[in-house]
Amino acid sequence: MKKQYGKLLVLLWAGLLAWIGILTGSARAASILKVGLLEEPKTLNVWLASDTWSRKVLGQIYQPLYVREPKELKLIPWLAESQPQYDPQKICYTVRLRKANWSDGTELTSEDVAFTGNFIKEFKVPRYYSKWRFIDRIETPDPRTVKFYLKEPRAIFLGRTLTTPIAQKKQWEKVAVQLRKAEKPIASLMKTKIEKPIGSGPFHLRQWKQGAYLYLCRNEHFFAQGKSIEGMTLGPHLDGIIFKLFGTSDAAILALKKGSIDMFWWGIQPGYLQDLKNNPNIQLFYSEKSALYYMGFNVRRPPFSDATLRRAIATLIDKDFIVNRILQGNAIKMHSIVPPGNRFWYCPDVPKYGEGLTKEERIKKAFEMLKGAGYTWEVPPLKPDGAIQPAKGIKLPDGSPMARFTILTPPADYDPNRAMAGMMIQEWLRMVGMPAFAKPMAFGSLIQQVKVRRKFDAFILGYGRLSLDPDYLRAFFHSRNNRVRGWNMSGYTNPEFDRLADLSAKAMDVQERRRLIWEMQRIIMRDVPYIPLYNPKLIEGVRKGKFEGWVQMLGGIGNVWTFCNLREK
Amino acid sequence: MELRRYIIRRLIQIAIIFYVILTVLFLLFRLAPGDPVSRMVDPTMTPEDAQRLISQLGLDQPIWVQYLYYVKNFFTGNFGHSFHYGKPVVEIIWDRLPNTVLLFTTSIILSALVGVFLGKIASWHKGKATDAVLTIGALVTHTVFLPWLALIMIWLFGYKMGWFPITGMISEEVWLDPESGIFAKALDVAHHMVLPLSTLFLIHFGAYLLIMRSSMLETLKEDYIITARAKGLSEKVIRDKHAAPNAALPVVTSVGLSLAFSINGGALTETVFTWPGIGRELVFSVSHNDYPLAQASFLLIAIVVLLANLVVDVLYAYLDPRIRY
């Protein structure tokens, strides 16, 4: 009897091993790209998706009228056929559509575009409404022409409104009917489940096995298939994309090394780099991001209401140390609020505080700035012979001692770089006698403290995905936004900046707007309510040898150009 | 009769405790830093847009109004929709729960069976090499840091040897293949389960082994064991029929409660192995202030644990005739 049990066990074990062999040895016939994600997309409802993972998937399904080309980041027609025609008399843009179809084979028409805009406006769809609220009406004279009438000229129309994903009227009309009946339409919209999104992008949803993978198939109706745009003959040349989920970077990187995935669509941390650099099967891409990590001040109250003090602090901060030592060289220094990778809008001639100075020179310069503004010390940071000494008892120009202040940072388990940068800044400020204390705080509390309670001295925060349109300058620093939950967290108020910001918002001439945006950057970097610190590089890894045609642009290789251009070797 | 009165008394206690938990959970999430809207906004969203969203989610109501809605919704079986998934939380929980129960229940039962068996052996060979090896082995595996062990398992058996999938619960090769039958799919899940199950087994069996060993050593000092020996019964019969069933009682309590707690999964295990269970959802919902999902998950855990306590107590009375309520 025991022998029989033994045989059965051996048979079961052999069966399991054989199955393992079948699984590991199974070949992939179709040309399918396997992409590793760290989290599961939360929804396929394009109007609800607020997480990175849903947007990565939905970006392959829903398409806008215009997209940024990869080299100069200029807006080029996508679902549109040509550049929009502007009639300044009527404040009207006319957009002519390409011949395009939805993934269900039906034609994409101007009705779909108008429906999308009207849907966003009617239901005040969060995250999109601010880009459409200034549209007065949308007309569709024929199936391939859309006319947008604006209430007033708005510069973000081109870069933000026309880059909104277009939804199919047929699919969303039923939703709109339901929402009109709902007591709380936004809440109802957020509960709307879309199981099979119909899009006009290069791929469409084939299967979503929740918790495991999401499979997108090639959209045979994709308008750009076989077309040459920006020097690329677009596909998609892939049969599909499978998004696989990994709970940790460790597991995803092992899967990449093993060949279980072809691309890990997430920034690789410096700790993994050496290992991956030594792996002949892995190719790494180092890209600039549209990101900003910065130190902000509460300029509503002393001592940071004094711009000289803020400039002195900017001078004391050693950005080279932060970039080279804390971020191990995987970042670039920031001197303006607009990232340098956003070449068109980045103003290169802003003041670069402390640039190229040694530690002693920075202390001397900050000391001179502060002394000139009336600050005094019990023990100044410079001895009479010019040598550096530990400073003590700094006093404000009115003679009162500078009170202890805190620099709020996210905790090290949330972002070790920002927590460490806070500690280093604390030390640099203490060199001139400032009673600075870095205080890591839970991210949610930090945001509440800065945006809602507004009781703070200084903070270090960041934006990982800044829009390519620089209208955020207006959001961050216009005095109108200096209110609870407003984006002007520093409480910065400058009528001249407000004037330029309002002009820039209405400047429809791109060169004129650039001039205004550059001037706004100069003003901000003169008054420094924020000190830009760094912009981390995005490092992404792919398998060599199987696919070619990766397109690198600001924000990395995970973009519509890559997925339309990629093909099997 | 006494038992029935005891059960009724306990059910009333459970109802009161549950109501307290219901209230504490509500307050905990409202008092926690951050708000759900802060995760959904970007610089293009005006404060008015944010306020509109808050209002539509009902988060601008006074806290006591929110509480009344919360209690009413609970008692009418309406657990709400997840802020992030946009789906009813019940649907999300029912999606994830079977995966968690499958992995964790299997691991607990397996660990308990092996732990009891080895604990029995260790106590029987007290002071000998077998006891030393088993006890030290149990202590070592039980105290290993779970994510570290999990990563080592993934690296060794998933990456280096390539015997098992690195993470996940299913392979797309099998599930996308129209020719794959139910048997192939079941085997695929089993294949994916080997590494997380082995890791959980290694971490947990030691605890049961140590409980069983300690309980068994106490039992072996009892008079009825001496009586059994005096009757001339074989050592195997004394160990397996007389000592072990009595010594296993503390393990029953432990297993009962572990089974109840297993429905919350293990955030660490599920994260490292990308096991699509409820533990990962709990972490996500708490960290993203997804109140409806977090509250419903915790309430489910609370009710199961409270009822499991009752079941264990009743089971105890059934297994040990000396215990009467």
Image: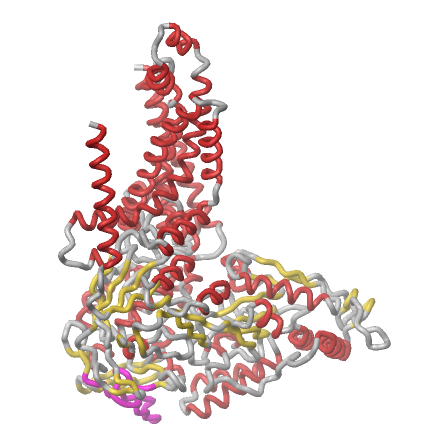
Frontmost residue, A317 versus A338: A317
Quarter of the N terminus of chain A within the rendering: top left
Q: Quadrant of residue A180?
A: bottom left
Q: Position of residue B136 (x, y in %)?
A: 49, 33
A154 over A382 or under it: above or below: below
User: Which is nearer the eye, A548 or A240?
Assistant: A548
| Foreground pick, A407 / A503 | A407
Is residue A481 among the parts visible in the rendering?
A: no
x and y percent of residue A195 in the render?
22, 61
Residue span colored magenta: A76-99
Residue at 44 percent of width and 47 percent of height: B149
Q: Residue at x 26, y 57 (%)?
A: A24
* Residue B315 locus on image (x, y percent): 33, 23
- Say if residue A269 shows up in the picture: yes
Q: A240 and A115: which one is in front? A: A240
Task: Check the image and report above or below for A43 versus B1.
Answer: below
Q: Residue at coordinates 52% horizontally, 84% vertically from top-left?
A: A499
Any magenta on residue A109? Answer: no
Vertical comparison of A25 with A93: above or below = above
Write the residue at 78% across / 67% down: A391
Magenta residue check for A95: yes
Rendered location of residue B90, percent (x, y): 28, 48
